[in-house]
Amino acid sequence: MRTALLEFAEGLRIALRAIWANKLRAVLTTLGIIIGIVSVTAMFTTINGIERGFDRSMAMLGTNTLSIDKNPQTFENDWWRYINRPPITRDIAEAIEEQSRYAVAVAPAVGTVRGVQYQDRELSTVFIRGSTPSIADINSLNLSAGRFYGEIEERSGRPVCIIGQDVAEALFPNETPVGKRIRVGGTRMEVLGVLEKQGKFLGLVSFDNQVTMPLSVFENAFGLSQWRQISVQVKVDEAENMVAAEDELTGIVRAVRGLDPMEEDNFAINRNDSFATQISGVKAAIYGVGLFLTGLALLVGGIGVMNIMFVSVRERTREIGIRKAVGASRRAILTQFLLEAVVVCMIGGVIGVALSFLVTQAINSVFTAVLSPGTVALAFGICVGVGVFFGFIPAWAAARSRPIESLRYE
């Protein structure tokens, strides 16, 4: 063991000295490795960001939730099947509240986009949502200031609202929003509360750029239309009851609609976890592209490392002969050149990881990405693997060289 450690230390010292003597050549050799490391880290940082953003976004939408809508969440060329369906109405929410065994909170909701103004400050595109007070429980809405509206405001149609953090910061940079009156799409409303900061849905759409108000106020101010319809949000008591709750809600809505047993549903019950299927497709595409680019770059980089190691072995043939003549073993020579190949790849790994931090920041500016310690460790592990795999043949050739012929080499 002591001999092996001494050989390792000596081989590493000689390898570092050889690389330092040819610094530029070593860096140029690692270009393929650098591209491969940047590719693999960009792939994993994006996927990690998508997964964390998805979990956070699902928490914002609410856990154990179902929504009853006119249309399914995803449909492509069969839109004609859904265009003439009747709209979802508030009586469906009332029937679910009365009859469902699994629903712990029910809230009809509808949304639009309008401008919001306070004095001379204005936001032109803000998501406006109208719903009953139960939406706070379904979407786990917490307030940083003020209070949420209640049943009294809902039934009386009192013009009040709750604003998100982005709206509060833009309209009230130096004052407290609670109690102030703002214009939402031209309608004056009193601010009752401010939501806690929630962040962006999948890093794209801000949940803080919103105004929530009683459903009755929304209907009075904006009305309903073919393109702006009610969706009934339902929170189920336990995750294991989701399937049973979906079947129960199907029966309740069919009864409200008066559908015959042979008629197909003219509504859709959507689950938030259906987004997971779509996210899986995105992740698979990123994996495919990332692995292809990574494999191609590492192959090119590995061949470059193998080539430069053959050159290094040829240049140092007399050195190898001298070391063998004074007693260096095949293992010592093999270790020396393997370490040199690995160190060259590690140089590329360090540069690649440094560039990956910049790439992660760039991705975060438009989407979401997380560079985890595990991804960095994987990057360096790949560097070691490439160095050993592509450096073995040149190192083995050096280890098997004959001392007399090596000393004779000019």
Image (cartoon, rainbow, N blue to C red):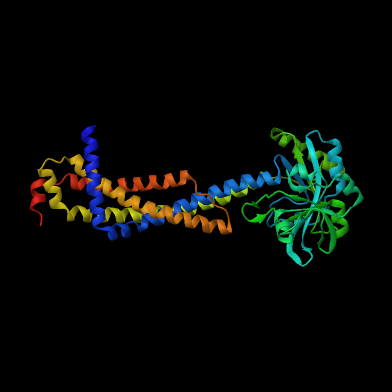
Tell me what residue is drawn at x 27 percent, y 46 percent.
Answer: 339
Foreground residue among 356 and 161: 161
Does residue 35 show up?
yes
Does residue 260 show up?
no
The single residue placed furthest to the bottom in the displayed view is 120
The spot of residue 289 in percent (x, y) is 48, 54
Tell me what residue is drawn at x 36 percent, y 58 percent.
Answer: 31
The spot of residue 40 in percent (x, y) is 45, 51
Q: Quadrant of the N terminus?
A: top left
Q: Is residue 322 left or right of residue 332?
A: left
Q: Is residue 134 above or below residue 43?
A: above
Q: Quadrant of the C terminus?
A: bottom left
Foreground residue among 197 and 288: 197
Tell me what residue is drawn at x 18 percent, y 54 percent.
Answer: 314
The single residue placed furthest to the right in the displayed view is 156
Count of marks, rendered view = 0
Q: Is residue 339 left or right of residue 187?
A: left
Foreground residue among 261 and 240: 240
Tell me what residue is drawn at x 72 percent, y 33 percent.
Answer: 238
Q: Is residue 218 left or right of residue 286?
A: right
The spot of residue 342 in percent (x, y) is 31, 48
Q: Quadrant of residue 75?
A: bottom right
Q: Is residue 176 left or right of residue 335?
A: right
